[in-house]
Image (tube, rainbow, N blue to C red):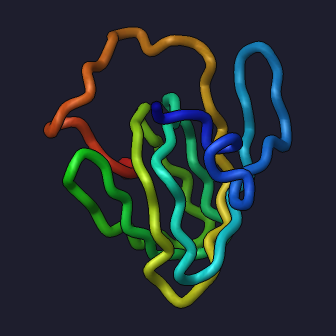
Amino acid sequence: MHSDPVVTNPQFYRVIFENERVRVLEYLDRPGDETTPHRHPDSVMFTLTAFQRRLSSGGRSVDVDLPEGEARWLPAQVHSGANIGDTATHTIFVELKEPAPIPVTPGPSEPLGPLP
């Protein structure tokens, strides 16, 4: 069962704020670190450092190269990740607790990783 990243990958994720509407996570890793599969609800991701990652889910993968100071929408998804760059990853996730206005069924056409 894919689960909460704070539970599945506590060495990388920590809760820095939570209330009844949002949860804010901090994520930190180093080059070569990998996460196990976990689930994210709809979220906004803010990059505190530039980084390169490979995100994988359901037999597909996507390489992501993001600059420092970038805010991106991250649609709800299950994935695992690997730091494939030569810098640490430091990001903040603002997870929404409210349901999406239109239910989304995960599938091969659903986005993987952050959207511009």
The x, y position of residue 52, in whole percent, is 45, 75
Residue pictured at 68% horizontal, 41% vertical: 7
User: Is 36 displayed left or right of 113 in the figure?
Assistant: right
* Front one among 49 and 9: 9
* Direction bottom: furthest residue: 86
The x, y position of residue 103, in whole percent, is 33, 12
* Direction left: furthest residue: 109
User: Is 20 displayed left or right of 73 in the figure?
Assistant: right
Q: Is residue 94 above or below residue 59?
A: above
Residue pictured at 38% horizontal, 51% vertical: 113
User: Is 112 displayed left or right of 42 in the figure?
Assistant: left
The x, y position of residue 67, in whole percent, is 51, 73
Identify the image quadrant of residue 19. top right
Q: How many marks?
A: 0
* Front one among 12 and 71: 12
Residue pictured at 50% horizontal, 42% vertical: 38
* Front one among 77 and 67: 77
User: Is 111 displayed left or right of 79 in the figure?
Assistant: left
Identify the image quadrant of residue 80. bottom left
Residue pictured at 62% horizontal, 32% vertical: 95
Identify the image quadrant of residue 61. bottom left
The x, y position of residue 51, in whole percent, is 52, 75
